[in-house]
Image (cartoon, rainbow, N blue to C red):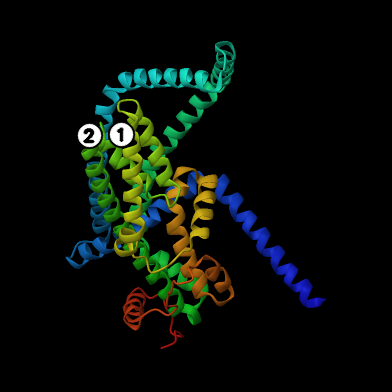
């Protein structure tokens, strides 16, 4: 009875803690979303910041240069995408007219196929229109709120990234001191593996995005699809969302293609997207991204869904990196290893012990900044 009660108590504490964390993440998302993105960019920019410091540049200037280089790269990508969107925007009235014609044609086919009278169809369309009109104010308000959040994130993320790069030694020292000197090596190893895996993951993801965009563009160009570059880039970006992104990209591309092409071209777009996705899933993702932490499909899909419910679209993009970080932490803490096993792939394998070379590097680093005291184990 006592053992059962102890188990129930642990289960209750765990569930209560998870619920409190979820509530905190949801209600404070305006704080956690930019911090999460900034933390990922910091892990990515530590290497160039360290390189600048080795060249004799001060830590503050090195952090600033690393952030500026990242901003310049993002602006170049944004300029390329926006130029394609501007070209699409100029043809938007024509696309809207063609979409209206396509919907009208679909209505006529529905009437002939299912023998629906004009009166019933008009009544159904009017009811849908009234419902959409009543929710217009809510949609407009939501749009303005989203735009304001995006602008706020664009300002906060570079600032947070710069500050995390500037004070990265203090942040690492905080984690080491929080767990005590007895666990210093384990904490150092976990932090080092998180940095390496997230850096490799993001670099691999960028390479994968570029290859997928090129393959999509080649396929759409062969089919003679209008807006081939825009559709290829958008599909590649949506493909970053595991499992769910490819379906959204395919439906969106098919819809835009249907307004200016034949049904055969629409089918060709679907085939191109699916074939490129199969190449990506079976060749590019394992070879190019090659993450050392394997997350099973169930945990990935649940993570994406939970991330979407908590943080919307940013949560969907952040789901997989956060799951990878959590798995590293779970695998390194004995009491949390069942959770790491739950997230992991059956064929995946990660080593729990950091390499001696990594340990020696971080030991020298923390001695330099006087993080360990005299009682530190040698």
* Label 1 to label 2: alpha-carbon separation: 8 Å
Q: Can residue 186 be seen?
A: yes
Disc 1 packing (10 Å; few <14; some 14–19; many ≥20): some
Q: Which mark is residue 142?
A: none
SS at circle 2: loop
Q: Quadrant of the C terminus?
A: bottom left
Disc 1 target residue: 265
Numbered-mark total: 2
**Disc 1 + disc 2, Cβ < 8 Å:** yes
Residue 325 position, x and y percent, is: 45, 64
Closer to the camera in the image, 310 or 84? 84
Q: Is residue 177 above or below residue 75?
A: below
Q: Residue furthest top?
A: 119
Q: Earlier in the sequence, mark 1 or mark 2?
A: 2
Disc 2 target residue: 224
Closer to the camera in the image, 266 or 192? 266
The quadrant in which residue 5 appears is: bottom right
Side of 39 where 206 appears, left or right: left
Residue 12 position, x and y percent, is: 71, 63
Q: Is residue 277 above or below residue 155?
A: below
The quadrant in which residue 14 appears is: bottom right
SS at circle 1: helix
Residue 39 position, x and y percent, is: 40, 56
Q: Residue furthest left?
A: 55
Disc 2 packing (10 Å; few <14; some 14–19; many ≥20): few
Q: Can residue 43 be seen?
A: no
Closer to the camera in the image, 276 or 189? 276
Closer to the camera in the image, 251 or 345? 251
Side of 98 where 299 appears, left or right: right
**What residue lies at 28% left-to-right and 28% top-to-bottom?**
88
Residue 251 position, x and y percent, is: 41, 37
């Amino acid at each position: 009875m006592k053992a059962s009660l102890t188990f129930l108590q642990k289960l209750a504490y765990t569930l209560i803690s998870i619920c409190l964390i979820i509530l905190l993440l949801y209600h404070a998302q305006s704080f956690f979303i930019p911090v999460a993105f900034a933390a990922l960019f910091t892990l990515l920019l530590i290497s160039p910041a360290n390189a600048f410091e080795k060249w004799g540049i001060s830590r503050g200037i090195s952090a600033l240069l690393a952030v500026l280089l990242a901003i310049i790269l993002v602006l170049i990508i944004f300029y390329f995408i926006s130029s394609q969107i501007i070209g699409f925007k100029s043809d938007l009235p024509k696309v809207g007219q063609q979409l209206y014609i396509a919907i009208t044609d679909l209505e006529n086919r529905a009437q002939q196929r299912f023998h629906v009278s004009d009166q019933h169809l008009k009544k159904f369309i009017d009811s849908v229109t009234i419902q959409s009109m009543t929710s217009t104010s809510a949609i407009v308000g939501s749009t303005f709120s989203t735009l304001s959040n995006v602008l706020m994130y664009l300002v906060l993320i570079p600032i947070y990234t710069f500050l995390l790069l500037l004070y990265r030694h203090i942040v690492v020292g905080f984690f080491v001191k929080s767990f005590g000197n007895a666990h210093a090596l384990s904490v150092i190893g976990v932090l080092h593996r998180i940095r390496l895996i997230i850096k490799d993951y993001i670099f691999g993801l960028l390479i994968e995005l570029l290859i997928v965009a090129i393959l999509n563009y080649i396929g759409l160009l062969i089919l003679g699809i209008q807006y081939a570059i825009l559709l290829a880039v958008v599909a590649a970006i949506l493909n970053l969302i595991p499992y769910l992104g490819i379906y959204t990209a395919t439906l969106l591309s098919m819809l835009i293609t249907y307004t200016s092409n034949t049904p055969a071209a629409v089918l060709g777009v679907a085939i191109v997207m699916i074939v490129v996705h199969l190449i990506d899933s079976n060749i590019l993702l394992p070879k190019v991204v090659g993450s050392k932490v394997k997350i099973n499909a169930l945990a990935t899909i649940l993570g994406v869904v939970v991330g979407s419910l908590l943080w919307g679209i940013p949560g969907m993009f952040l789901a997989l990196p956060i799951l990878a970080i959590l798995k590293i932490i779970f695998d390194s803490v004995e009491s949390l290893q069942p959770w790491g096993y739950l997230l992991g792939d059956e064929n995946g394998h990660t080593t729990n012990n950091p390499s001696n070379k990594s340990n020696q590097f971080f030991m020298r680093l923390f001695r330099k900044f006087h993080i360990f005291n005299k009682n530190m184990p040698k």
